[in-house]
Image (cartoon, grey):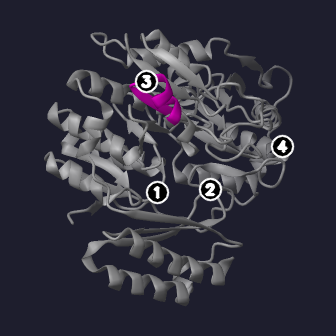
Amino acid sequence: MATETAPAAEASTARRLFGTDGVRGVANVHPMTAEMALQLGRALAWIVRSGPHRHRIVIGKDTRLSGYMLEQAIASGICSMGVDVMLCGPLPTPGIAFITHSMRADAGVVISASHNPYQDNGIKFFSRDGFKLPDETELRIERLVLGESGGAEAFRALRPTAHRIGKAQRIDDAIGRYVVFLKSLFPRDLTLDGMTVVVDCAHGAGYRVAPAVFGELGARVVTLSARPDGKNINAGCGAVHPEGMARAVVKHGAQLGIALDGDADRVIVADERGRIVDGDAIMAVVGRDLLRRKQLAKRTLVATVMSNIGLERALRGAGGRVVRTQVGDRYVVDEMRRSGLNFGGEQSGHLVFLDHVTTGDGVCAALNLLEVMLRQGKSLSELARCFEPVPQVQRNVPVREKRPLASLPAVQKAVRAVELALGGDGRVLVRYSGTENKARVLVEGSDARKIAAHADRIVGELQRELA
C-alpha cells in the first residue's frame, strides 16, 4: 500500500494542560476552572502584546452552561493585562477563526469542548491569521501559567492601571458577518433552489448560522436540534449521533442530511436514502472532484492515521495520493501549510478547505459537497460509490493514567500478534486520546468478525494494565 506519512509534530512530555485541541476537562474541575481560565487569558494577552498599538482578542463560545463562567474569567484575565476583548457569544469555532482574522485582532479564544457532553468544556486559541496556535506557543502559555517560564515573574507582576486596563465590547453582528462569508464560498452560478436539506445543529454553536446559510442559498431547510438550553448540546444528536438526522432525510425526502457537532467544526452527512456518510467518504467524493477539475494541489489529499485504507484506494484510482498525519485537525492543517496543499481532514468529519478557511468548518464542507452534487448532477449515493471502506473496528478504553504504550509489554505483545495475524491485509493503531483519558484502538482488515476479535484482545490487555 503506497501510504505516505507526514513528519509527526514533536511531542513535548512537559505539556500538562494542553492536549491536541486546547485545554479540556470537566467544567469547574481543574484545569477547567474560572481561576485557570483567568490565568490562561492573562498568559495569552502577555504573549500577543507587541508594539505600541491597542491589542484586541476575540472570544467566542458554544452553548454550554459553563461557557458564561469561563467567558467572563478569560475576559477578566485579558483585560487585566491591558488588552481589549471582543465578545462574539455563541459562534462556531471556524467563525471565531474568521472573525479574528477579518477584524485584525491579535488572537482568538474559543470556549468549547466540541463533541463532548455539556458538563465538559475547553479552551483553545487562534493566532491573528486565523490558524490554531502552534504547539510551542501553547507550551509557552502553559509554562507561564504554571510559573515555569523565563519571564514568568514579569508576567505575574504586570498590572496595568487607569486607562491602560483593557475593556470589553460585544460584536453584535458576528453571526451576520460569518453567514455572509460562508455564503460567499458557494459559487454564484449555483443555487440550492428546489433542494431539501436536513440540518442537525446539535443544540450547539451553529444553531443560528447553519440554517441561515442553507436557507438563504435557496434550500428548504428542515432544522433539527436548534434549541440549546445549556445542557442539551450533543445529547443524542449532531455529528456524534447522526441517526435522527438520517431518519429525517428519508421522512422529508431530502437530498442531503447534515449533522454538525457542538462547535460546528466538523460534519457527518447522510445521503438521500438515509445512509450515513463519514469524513473519509466525503473526502473521497470531494477529493476526486477536485482532481477531475485539476484543483487538488499537487494531486495530494491530507488525512490522519485513522482514515480508512479505502480513501487511499479511491484517490489513487483517480490519479491522486494521500499523505497521513497524526490525529488532530491541527496536524492536518500543519501538513497542508508545510507542503502547499489545499484539502484534507479526518474521518470524524473535520474537513479543511484551505483555499477558503483556516480550520475545520462543517458548513463550509457541506457547501463544497453540495457543489459537487450540483455540478455533476448526481445524488450523494451515486457519488459515494467511489469509496469502498475496508472493515474497520474502533474501541475506546477509559484509563486512569496515560503510561507510555511502549512500557506495557502485554499490550505490545498483543499488538504484534494481531499484526502477524493480519499480515499485509490490514493494520493496527493504538494511541491515547489527546482530549480525554482514553486509549483508542483501531484494527483494519478484510474480515469484520476477525478484526473485532483482534481489537477485543488488545482492549483486554489495555484494561488489565490501565483501567
Circle 2 SS class: loop
Contact (CB < 8 A) between labels 4 and 1? no
Q: Are marks 2 and 4 in contact (CB under 8 Å)?
A: no
Which amino acid does the dot numbered 2 rest on?
A: Thr
Q: Residue 49: in sight, yes or no?
A: no
Most foreground residue, 29 or 35 = 29
Please identify, in this view, whether the residue under mark 3 or under mark 4 is nearer the observer.
Answer: 3
Q: Tell me residue 323's x, y (percent).
A: 29, 55
Circle number at residue 253 = 3
Q: Nearer the viewer, residue 323 or 369?
A: 369
Q: Is residue 20 left or right of residue 230?
A: left
Q: Is residue 36 left or right of residue 403?
A: right
What residue is pinned by disc 2?
A: 435
- Residue indicated by mark 4: 34
Kind of residue at disc 4: Ala
**Can you give x and y, in whole percent of width and height, for residue 89 in the image?**
70, 24
Instruction: Name the mark on residue 224.
Output: none
Mark pair 3, 4: CA separation: 46 Å
For the record, the magenta segment spans 247-258
Q: What is the residue that sits farthest to the front in this orientation?
A: 251
